[in-house]
């Protein structure tokens, strides 16, 4: 059977979709694009913003026009079951908690034979490994906790086995992902922590590079920072800020204030002066006036972020913030996002320039007409000028030569030594 797996949204969604593709391929199905006339489309949707809702609906409509059978899952599907059934009563909707049943559902409705396996180019050279799902927090703007439920952790041995499988397939990096990584293991008896998981991965696997996708600032403790001194753990953290104003953080129902965030950042930078730290910021949250926005802008400028993701506040039905007073006009939100993007661009450029002359590990990802694109351990996108004997998926050492349009130009070092390992 030809199957298209279409994904929107977070790294957790992407990890789930990668697992679908691997399992379906192993069972004899051909993973294809939507333009290749699939027999079945599996759509993993997102509802983090109204734009994500629109993109989910758009993707579902495109899939329906392809005449394929359509299975829809993910957070948009979770919260909009009735709306989807109105679009087409034949859409099969799978709840987030039942995603694992999708593979069994496909098996029951196909006669695929493993002899029919079609080898497909890897979609990612740095695969996501889902270790946790759900969230116990109640941020006032977020519908994902409604759609995903409470925090649930993947058993340590399951994670280890998945990473060993990827290691055997010659992957060089895995990205540990979840909806709220910092709550990993709290649902186990006895309780475990994310640090326990990372320690086990370091001891029981030999995957060359391990990346942590996103962690809350108060959950990055000394134990985790000490584990990150292992050279296999990427010098990169993504630490969501959302706002730099205490009043807005309180309205958002976040678990820290600006001082807590700054203190946490200082602790990280003291341990790893050259680490790459990214963040998320929401502009135009209800009640955010010029003063509150300026506090956010000031805090961001003062922090050594290497990049940032800025989003306009999006009113999510069913959340506390949807009923708040003081909603900010769309035009103002758009202006504030543009200001934050400019700050982020400057910080990203400065971080790349800071790394000029350094030799860094790079996972080679995509071939272009003139070279390769890859990602360093400290999360810099690099362009490697078409050297001989370099292929996608390799882990190489490269010197950062210069910066151009927010990407680093790099030269591979010691290619012959790498190939003789």
Image (spheres, rainbow, N blue to C red):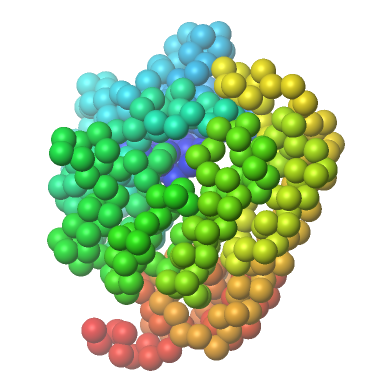
Displayed quadrant of residue 151: top left
276 to the left or right of 183 = right
Q: Residue at x 82, y 43 (%)?
A: 290
Q: Position of residue 281 (x, y in %)?
A: 63, 47
For this orientation, the residue located farthest to the front is: 259
Q: Residue at x 78, y 50 (%)?
A: 294
Residue 341, horizontal then vertical, whole percent? 72, 55
Is 80 located above or below residue 8 in the figure?
above
Report the number of numbered marks: 0
Which quadrant holds the N terminus? top left
Q: Is residue 265 visible?
A: yes
User: Foreground: 251 or 380?
Assistant: 251
Q: Name the residue located 43 percent from the left edge and 89 percent from the top edge.
A: 413
- Image location (x, y in percent) of residue 345: 70, 63
- Residue 54 vs 81, above or below: the answer is below
Q: Position of residue 293 (x, y in %)?
A: 76, 45
> Would you say residue 67 is visible in this rendering?
no
Residue 358, compared with residue 380, is above or below; it is below
Q: Residue at x 74, y 22 (%)?
A: 325
Q: Quadrant of the C terminus?
A: bottom left
């Amino acid at each position: 059977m030809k199957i298209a797996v279409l994904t929107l949204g977070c790294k957790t969604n992407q990890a789930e979709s990668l697992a679908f593709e691997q399992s379906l391929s192993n069972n004899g199905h051909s993973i294809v694009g939507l333009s290749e006339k699939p027999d079945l489309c599996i759509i993993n949707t997102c509802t983090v913003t109204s734009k994500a809702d629109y993109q989910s609906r758009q993707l579902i409509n495109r899939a329906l026009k392809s005449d394929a059978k359509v299975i829809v899952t993910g957070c948009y599907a979770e919260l909009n079951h009735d709306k989807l059934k109105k679009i087409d009563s034949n859409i099969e909707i799978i709840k987030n908690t039942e995603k694992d049943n999708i593979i069994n559902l496909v098996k029951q409705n196909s006669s695929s034979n493993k002899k029919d396996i079609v080898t497909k180019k890897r979609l990612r050279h740095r695969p996501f490994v889902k270790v946790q799902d759900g969230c116990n927090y109640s941020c006032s703007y977020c519908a994902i906790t409604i759609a995903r439920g409470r925090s649930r952790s993947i058993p340590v041995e399951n994670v280890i086995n998945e990473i060993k499988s990827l290691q055997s397939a010659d992957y060089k990096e895995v990205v540990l992902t979840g909806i709220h990584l910092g709550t990993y293991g709290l649902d186990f008896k006895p309780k475990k922590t994310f640090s326990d998981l990372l320690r086990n991965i370091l001891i029981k696997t030999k995957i060359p590079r391990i990346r942590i996708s996103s962690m809350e600032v108060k959950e990055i403790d000394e134990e985790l920072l000490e584990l990150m001194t292992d050279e296999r753990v990427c010098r990169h953290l993504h630490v969501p800020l959302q706002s730099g104003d205490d009043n807005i953080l309180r309205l958002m129902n976040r678990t820290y204030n600006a001082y807590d965030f700054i203190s946490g950042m200082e602790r990280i930078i003291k341990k790893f002066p050259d680490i790459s730290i990214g963040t998320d910021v929401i502009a135009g949250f209800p009640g955010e006036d010029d003063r509150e926005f300026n506090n956010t802008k000031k805090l961001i400028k003062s922090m050594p972020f290497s990049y940032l993701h800025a989003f306009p506040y999006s009113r999510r039905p069913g959340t506390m913030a949807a009923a708040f007073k003081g909603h900010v006009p769309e035009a103002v939100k758009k202006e504030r996002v543009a200001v934050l993007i400019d700050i982020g661009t400057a910080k990203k450029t400065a971080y790349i320039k800071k790394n000029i002359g350094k030799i860094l590990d790079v996972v080679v990802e995509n071939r272009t007409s003139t070279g390769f694109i890859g990602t360093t351990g400290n999360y810099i996108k690099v362009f490697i000028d078409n050297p001989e004997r370099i292929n996608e998926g390799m882990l190489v050492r490269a010197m950062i030569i210069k910066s151009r349009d927010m990407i680093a130009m790099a030269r591979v070092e010691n290619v012959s030594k790498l190939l003789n390992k």
